[in-house]
């Protein structure tokens, strides 16, 4: 399924400007920050060694430090080197973002990229968008190899740049970031590639494709995979609601979100629909203040978004909290009052359903896919575990029992931003398994076509229930 979003990446570019110079850091500065990076993520991460033994991590740190060049480094080189250290934790919320500034400079200097955008399904890579001039390549064809390397081998080279708990989630993040962008980060500029493709008739062929300009690629690809859009729509006695992202950079973002939810459910109530579909697909997550408010409109009992929630304090975390305008809330005070390095449990108040006169009382179905992240995945688990609704779609890439509550800080020499999880969240049902939210009704989400398989199939199922007819 293909979503037609705005050009989110270039909106982001517009906010930070188009710098023509490529920032460079001295080898000394990069090494100082590299040392600080490893020390600081051990202090700030809730449990950096949850999935990797410290001995292995120390060994990687030594190898990466030795391999740092003696000359100055570009931002792209520096971020790539640091990502290899951070992502080794295999924790989705411990990360350094894609080096957008370098990519922007490259784009406006006439840079080019690989012309095929990919979707990963069942451990196979399919062409999602084709910007090459080769008419033999079709959307939906399987990409088997680039040059003398299979796609699986190329992914193994990309994975150290991608923070995630498992390969299924890493593949989702490669889709999220975009394969051509990551391939540029890994290998730099190339003008052409020999690729091996299997078409829909299982015929395998080799062909050479030319690079396309970054500007053309970003313009034609039509936006980001993850970018939920607010929408309320009705299909007879079925209401469909996408509430958008669970967060905002605007000061009044939470208030605006809640007003939208209020007005949406007011209309839903007036329409007297029997079924409600909540769409959490392609949602990056955010803050539980948003998701809890949404859920309160169809919850039938008080709820929490976790079974257990615990936090690790650190000097860096406290410094970041003190930079906030308001540090008087109980949660901030609890972190500030505990000694550095202390892990403690914290319990947020139970969230109550909204008053019954406003509440939706019909059947609820929640759509998820592999691009359902963080608090959106946690919310889906909350709904499933409390039986507030049925989950429909495919397993989420992100996991609902996770190291999260991400916060950020800058490295002192380079100013590169590091993101780390300060908390450990156990999903409502108490499961600690390393798996995504699994749907009650499985429907695969094909990102390689224009069809909305999950929504369309669910609407078909609900229409059968409504009309009392059986499918032939």
Image (cartoon, rainbow, N blue to C red):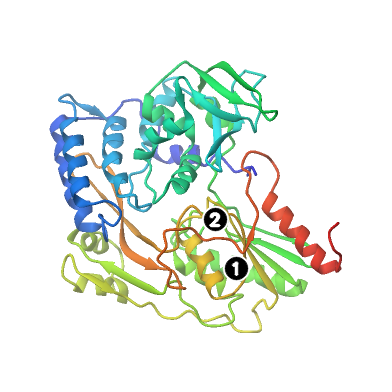
Q: Is residue 236 visible?
A: no
Q: Quadrant of the C terminus?
A: bottom right
- CA separation, marks 2 and 1? 26 Å
Q: Is 387 on the left or on the right of 91, as rendered?
A: right
Element class at badge 2:
loop
Between 147 and 388, the residue placed more toward the observer is: 147
Do the CB atoms of the residues marked 2 and 1 lie less than 8 Å apart?
no
Element class at badge 1:
helix
- Mark earlier in primary sequence (2, 1): 1
| Residue 140 drawn above or below residue 242 | above
Which quadrant of the structure image shows residue 311? bottom left
| Residue 391 drawn above or below residue 299 | above
Answer few, some or many: residues within 10 Å of disc 2's Cα (few below 14, many 20 plus, some between 14 and 19). many
Which quadrant of the structure image shows residue 234? bottom right
Q: What residue appears at the point 42 percent right and 59 percent down from the top-left corner?
A: 434
Between 32 and 194, the residue placed more toward the observer is: 194
| Residue 110 drawn above or below residue 313 | above
Q: Give the residue number, with chain letter if any, for mark 1.
A: 261
Residue 240's spot in the image, x, y percent?
69, 62
Q: What residue appears at the point 54 percent right and 49 percent down from the top-left corner?
A: 227
Any mark on residue 395, and which? 2
Answer few, some or many: residues within 10 Å of disc 1's Cα (few below 14, many 20 plus, some between 14 and 19). many
Q: Is 26 on the left or on the right of 300, as rendered?
A: left
Residue 179's spot in the image, x, y percent?
48, 34
Q: Is 70 on the left or on the right of 158, as rendered?
A: left
Q: Quadrant of the N terminus?
A: top right
């Amino acid at each position: 399924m293909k979503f037609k979003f705005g050009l989110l990446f270039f909106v982001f570019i517009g906010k930070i400007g188009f710098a023509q110079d490529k920032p460079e850091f001295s080898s000394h500065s990069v090494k100082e920050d590299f040392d600080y990076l490893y020390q600081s993520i051990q202090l700030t991460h809730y449990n950096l060694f949850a999935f990797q033994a410290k001995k292995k991590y120390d060994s990687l740190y030594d190898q990466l430090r030795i391999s740092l060049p003696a000359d100055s480094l570009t931002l792209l080189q520096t971020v790539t080197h640091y990502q290899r250290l951070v992502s080794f934790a295999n924790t989705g919320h411990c990360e350094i973002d894609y080096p957008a500034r370098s990519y922007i400079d490259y784009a406006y200097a006439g840079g080019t990229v690989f012309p095929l955008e990919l979707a990963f399904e069942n451990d196979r890579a399919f062409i999602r968008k084709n910007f090459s001039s080769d008419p033999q390549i079709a959307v939906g064809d399987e990409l088997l190899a680039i040059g003398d390397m299979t796609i699986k081998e190329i992914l193994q080279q990309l994975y150290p740049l991608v923070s995630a708990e498992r390969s299924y989630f890493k593949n989702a993040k490669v889709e999220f970031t975009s394969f051509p962008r990551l391939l540029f980060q890994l290998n730099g500029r190339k003008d052409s590639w020999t690729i091996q493709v299997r078409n829909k008739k299982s015929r395998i062929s080799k062909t050479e494709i030319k690079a396309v300009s970054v500007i053309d690629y970003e313009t034609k690809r039509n936006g980001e995979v993850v970018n939920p859009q607010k929408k309320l729509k009705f299909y007879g006695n079925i209401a469909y609601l996408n509430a958008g992202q669970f967060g905002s950079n605007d000061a009044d973002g939470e208030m605006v979100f809640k007003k939208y939810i209020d007005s949406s459910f007011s209309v839903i109530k007036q329409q007297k629909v029997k079924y409600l579909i909540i769409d959490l697909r392609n949602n990056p997550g955010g803050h539980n203040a948003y998701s809890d408010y949404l859920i309160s409109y169809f919850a039938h009992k008080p709820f929490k978004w976790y079974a257990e929630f615990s936090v690790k304090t650190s000097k860096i975390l406290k410094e970041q909290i003190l930079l906030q305008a308001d540090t008087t809330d109980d949660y901030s005070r609890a972190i500030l009052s505990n000694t550095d390095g202390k892990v403690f449990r914290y319990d947020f108040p139970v969230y109550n359903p909204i008053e019954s006169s406003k509440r939706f009382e019909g059947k609820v179905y929640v759509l998820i896919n592999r691009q359902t992240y963080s608090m959106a995945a946690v919310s889906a688990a909350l709904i499933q575990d409390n039986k507030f609704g049925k989950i429909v779609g495919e397993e989420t890439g992100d996991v609902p029992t996770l190291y999260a509550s991400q916060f950020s800080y800058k490295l002192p020499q380079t100013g590169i931003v590091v993101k780390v999880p300060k908390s450990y969240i156990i999903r409502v049902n108490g499961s600690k398994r390393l798996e995504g939210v699994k749907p009650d009704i499985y429907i695969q989400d094909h990102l390689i076509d224009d069809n909305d398989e999950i929504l369309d199939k669910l609407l078909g199922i609900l229409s059968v229930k409504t009309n009392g007819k059986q499918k032939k």
